[in-house]
């Protein structure tokens, strides 16, 4: 997607595509600067795009797609291979720029679809299995809750797990664990009051086994 081989920087890539999409010259510099800020690439704006890390390249690609007010944007797993912090940065970026546009994206993560999508289509083995709003799918297929926790330190893992076991009367289960993130499964019958005991968490209803998210760890 990048142009110019070794010769164009992050800012120049955005400027090129902004020009290609018809941004007026008087507005181009401002739009490029605003997009660089939204992407969190201020320190990398003068680096060659071809020499960026994989996660930074992915953010730049999304910026290229968004700049110029494109009305239809198609993204293939926009957060694949990035860490949890970069993933949420990309979510915030897409949420900020989604108004007035149509965004079509693929993802293996149900929490990502829940955050970003107005409507979700679930495809398995090449077949459309379910479609509808997040609320509709949760009501129809919900079997429990997923709790995502970002780890500040590996030394806190055992204490966090003990806390969750105590708060749920030993009804939680550690499902997946990445370098800096844990995913727990909680029982569906937790009350709102019980859920409020957990600080700094994001949770979503767990889908049935037919439509659960992939167990494969990110690259």
Image (cartoon, grey):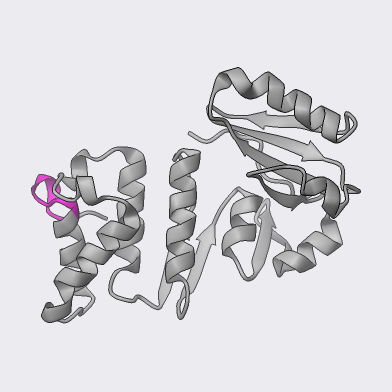
* Residue 150: x %, y % from top left: 58, 36
Task: Indicate whether 176 appears above or below 74.
Answer: above
Q: Is residue 103 magenta?
A: no
Q: How many marks overall?
A: 0
Observer able to see residue 82: yes
Look at 68% across and 36% down and name the residue there.
183
**Residue at 63 percent of width and 44 percent of height:** 200
Looking at the image, residue 50 sits to the left or right of residue 187; the answer is left
Residue 11 falls in image quadrant: bottom left
Q: Residue at x 76, y 66 (%)?
A: 135
Quick check: 39 left or right of 120? left
Q: Position of residue 209 (x, y in %)?
A: 81, 45
| Residue located 82% across and 49% down the image | 208
Residue found at the far left of this picture: 7
| Residue 120 versus residue 21 in the image, above or below | above
Check residue 9 for magenta coloring: yes
From this view, report whether residue 174 is shown above or below residue 101.
Answer: above
Task: Determine whether, in the image, residue 191 is placed left or right of residue 30.
Answer: right
Region in magenta: 3-10
The location of residue 170, given as percent across then percent down, is 88, 28
User: On the picture, is 80 further left or further right than 215?
Assistant: left
Between 143 and 27, the one lying in front of the other is 27
The quarter in which the N terminus is drawn is bottom left
Counting from the top left corner in percent of width and height, residue 89 is at 44, 51
- Residue 143 in view in this figure: no
């Amino acid at each position: 997607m990048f142009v110019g081989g070794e010769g164009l920087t992050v800012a120049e890539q955005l400027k090129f595509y902004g020009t290609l999409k018809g941004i007026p010259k008087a507005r181009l510099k401002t739009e490029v600067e605003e997009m660089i800020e939204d992407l969190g690439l201020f320190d990398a704006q003068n680096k060659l795009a071809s020499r960026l890390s994989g996660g930074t390249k992915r953010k730049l690609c999304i910026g290229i797609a968004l700049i110029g007010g494109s009305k239809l944007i198609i993204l293939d797993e926009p957060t694949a291979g990035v860490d949890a912090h970069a993933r949420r940065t990309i979510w915030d970026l897409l949420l900020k720029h989604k108004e007035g546009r149509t965004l079509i994206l693929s993802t293996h993560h149900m929490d990502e679809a829940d955050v970003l999508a107005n409507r979700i289509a679930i495809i398995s083995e090449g077949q459309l299995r379910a479609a509808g709003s997040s609320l509709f799918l949760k009501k129809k297929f919900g079997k429990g809750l997923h709790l995502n926790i970002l780890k500040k330190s590996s030394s806190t893992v055992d204490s966090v797990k003990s806390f969750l076991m105590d708060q749920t009367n030993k009804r939680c289960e550690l499902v997946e664990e990445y370098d800096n993130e844990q995913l727990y499964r909680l029982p569906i019958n937790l009350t709102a009051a019980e859920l409020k005991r957990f600080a700094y968490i994001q949770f979503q209803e767990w889908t049935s086994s037919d439509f659960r998210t992939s167990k494969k760890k990110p690259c």
